[in-house]
Amino acid sequence: MMSMNKETPPDAEPSAGESAGSVESQSLKEKLGALEKETAEYLAGWQRAKADLLNYKKEERERLEKMVAYANESCVLNLLPVLDNLERAEQGIPEEQAKDPVTQGFMQIAKQLREFLKNQGAEEIHALGEQFNPALHEAVGETEGLPEQSGRVAQVVEKGYRIKERVLRAAKVKVGITGNQ
């Protein structure tokens, strides 16, 4: 008996049923490709949106930190004249009154205020004997002195302060000059 198996030669035309399956297969491949492309576009868009959100959060955090730092600097700057006056009062206390409880109370207030400013990051600009620096010092006068003192801070009239590298208030100073200038 002869076998009814028909093998289709490779170069033969597909039958109508095979042609429809091939077209359907091709159509599904095209749809799959389009969906993969669409998926890639959505993923890229989501990744961009996520990166934008992370950048926004970072920028907002930095902006808020700057606002807090500015408010802190403003508070410190407003307290400096109070500390100046307390220090002037301390300098004018006669020795016999130094042990008086009221005097001790004012001295304690000045100490607490200095500690508060230190905790806020404020530090005094050390100027006495330093080379005059217009970024840190404000010259309010001159004082005659030795040639090696010329151009150096001879007297601090009002202390200067800074927070980190930012100058809050320049030190008001008198600068040394030689007598024959």
Image (spheres, rainbow, N blue to C red):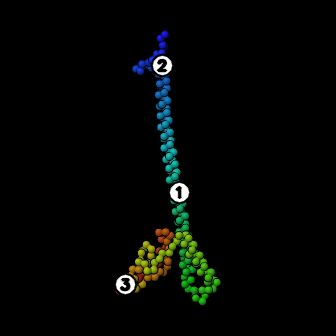
Q: Indicate the secondary structure of the residue bearing disc 2.
A: helix
Q: Check the image and report above or below for 146 versus 79.
A: below
Judged from this view, the residue extending furthest toward the left is: 180
Residue 93 visible in this rendered orientation of the protein: yes
Farthest residue, direction bottom? 96
**The C terminus lies in which quarter of the figure?**
bottom left
Q: Amino acid at mark 2?
A: Ala
Nearer the N terminus, badge 1 or badge 3? 1
| Residue at image point 52% right, 51% down | 53
Asked if the residues shown at circle 2 and circle 3 are in contact, with their CB atoms under 8 angstroms apart, the answer is no
Q: Which mark is residue 16?
A: 2
Q: Amino acid at mark 1?
A: Glu
Say above or below: 32 vs 46: above
Percent x, y for residue 147? Answer: 37, 84
Where residue 103 appears, x then y in whole percent?
A: 61, 83
Image side of residue 155 versus residue 100, left or right? left
Which residue was labeled with disc 1?
60
Q: In what element is the residue under mark 3?
A: helix
- Mark in front: 1 vs 3: 3
Image mark count? 3
Please give the residue where the numbered disc 3 appears in the rendered image. Answer: 147
The answer to whether the residues at label 1 and label 3 have Cβ atoms under 8 Å apart is no
